[in-house]
């Protein structure tokens, strides 16, 4: 595992930046050099400022420094989810894992949690059990324990944001809407962290698809407006590029396919114009999948994540 200084020096070199180019009134050339060679420690404020200077998110930094951003518990959850992921299905030539095998793995996680309790694992087991057994999405048997947790926690971090994204289609529409309206208040401690704006927009974009799945297009449009206002307020240009595509997503399910395609193409055009080839390929695939799913009358829920989550 790299030290913080070693990882920072790696990113600085990879971007072709000199110490002098990164230094400013907050961090001198001498201080950065000592930090990179593990001769001194720096404050969190100085460190966050350095990441801003070189354009690297905290998650991206930790991925390089540690080799992974997952805790042991999150790794177990990831391995469970991977069993039914699209990558696994493709690798198995289209053969989905059986529901019996998924239930068996879920039972194993639940049994393990009963011996060594972990909040994250308990909540994931509760949520996945609901999704695998609950057919009536309008039922009141949704995961109320998770709703209570998200309501009571004053300061949301990345874990709570991601948990909420996974729960949006499980909660009743009014519950998801109330929590969505409180996101800005819940994440105040994250406001100064790199990548903050994109993380919040990912919540809004996930909620849009969740409301579409629940056939509440009015709430989907209200959420889109919240996302648009947030992008303008936070000057989040990268997320703003995706706004036309999200509007197209809603418009498609209103039955206006031609108008939706024009909105989809607007986002793709921006990606081409800015030479964001990976983003273009990724969103082109998502959009084509959405149009196919729409014709098959299968609204699809997406949990939008950062590349390094």
Image (cartoon, helix red, strand yellow):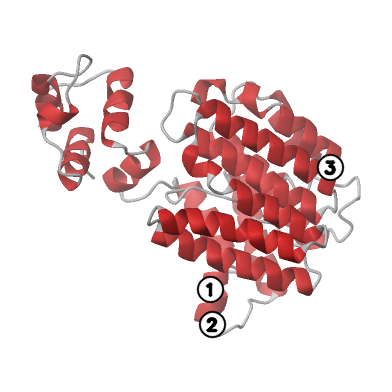
Q: Check whether the beta carbons of the residues at disc 3 and disc 1 lie within 8 A of each other.
A: no
The residue positioned 41% from the left and 32% from the top of the image is 194
Residue 23 as seen in the image, left or right of residue 198: left
Total label count? Answer: 3
Q: Check whether the beta carbons of the residues at disc 2 and disc 1 lie within 8 A of each other.
A: yes
The residue at which mark 1 appears reads as 88
Question: Is there any visible trace of residue 117 in the rendered image?
Answer: no
Give the crowd class for mark 1: few <14, some 14-19, many >=20 residues within 10 Å.
some
Q: Tell me the distance, in whole angstroms, between the alpha carbons under discs 2 and 1.
A: 6 Å
Q: Tell me the distance, in whole angstroms, between the alpha carbons under discs 3 and 1.
A: 31 Å
The residue positioned 75% from the left and 53% from the top of the image is 250
Find the residue positioned furthest to the top. 25
The residue positioned 76% from the left and 68% from the top of the image is 294
The residue positioned 23% from the left and 20% from the top of the image is 42
Residue 210 as seen in the image, left or right of residue 117: right
The residue at which mark 2 appears reads as 92
């Amino acid at each position: 595992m790299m030290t913080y200084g070693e990882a920072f020096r790696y990113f600085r070199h990879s971007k072709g930046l000199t110490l002098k180019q990164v230094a400013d009134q907050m961090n001198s050339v001498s201080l950065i050099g000592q930090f990179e060679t593990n001769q001194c420690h720096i404050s969190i404020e100085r460190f966050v400022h350095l990441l801003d200077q070189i354009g690297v998110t905290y998650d991206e930094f930790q991925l390089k420094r540690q080799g992974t951003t997952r805790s042991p518990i999150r790794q177990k959850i990831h391995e469970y989810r991977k069993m039914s992921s699209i990558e696994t299905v493709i690798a198995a030539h289209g053969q989905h894992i059986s529901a019996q095998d998924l239930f068996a793995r879920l039972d194993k996680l639940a049994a393990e949690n009963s011996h060594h309790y972990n909040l994250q694992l308990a909540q994931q087991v509760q949520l996945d059990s609901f999704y695998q057994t609950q057919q009536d999405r309008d039922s009141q048997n949704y995961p109320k324990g998770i709703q209570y947790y998200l309501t009571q926690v004053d300061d949301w971090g990345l874990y709570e944001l991601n948990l909420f994204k996974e729960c949006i289609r499980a909660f009743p529409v009014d519950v998801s809407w109330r929590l969505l309206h409180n996101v800005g208040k819940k994440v105040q401690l994250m406001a100064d962290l790199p990548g903050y704006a994109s993380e919040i927009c990912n919540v809004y974009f996930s909620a849009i698809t969740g409301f579409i799945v629940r056939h509440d297009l009015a709430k989907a449009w209200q959420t889109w407006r919240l996302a648009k206002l947030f992008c303008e307020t936070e000057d989040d240009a990268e997320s703003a590029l995706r706004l036309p595509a999200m509007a197209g997503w809603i418009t498609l399910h209103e039955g206006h396919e031609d108008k939706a395609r024009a909105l989809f193409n607007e986002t793709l055009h921006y990606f081409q114009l800015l030479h964001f080839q990976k983003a273009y390929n990724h969103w082109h695939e998502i959009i084509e999948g959405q149009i196919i799913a729409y014709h098959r009358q299968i609204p699809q829920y997406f949990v939008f994540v950062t590349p390094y989550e």
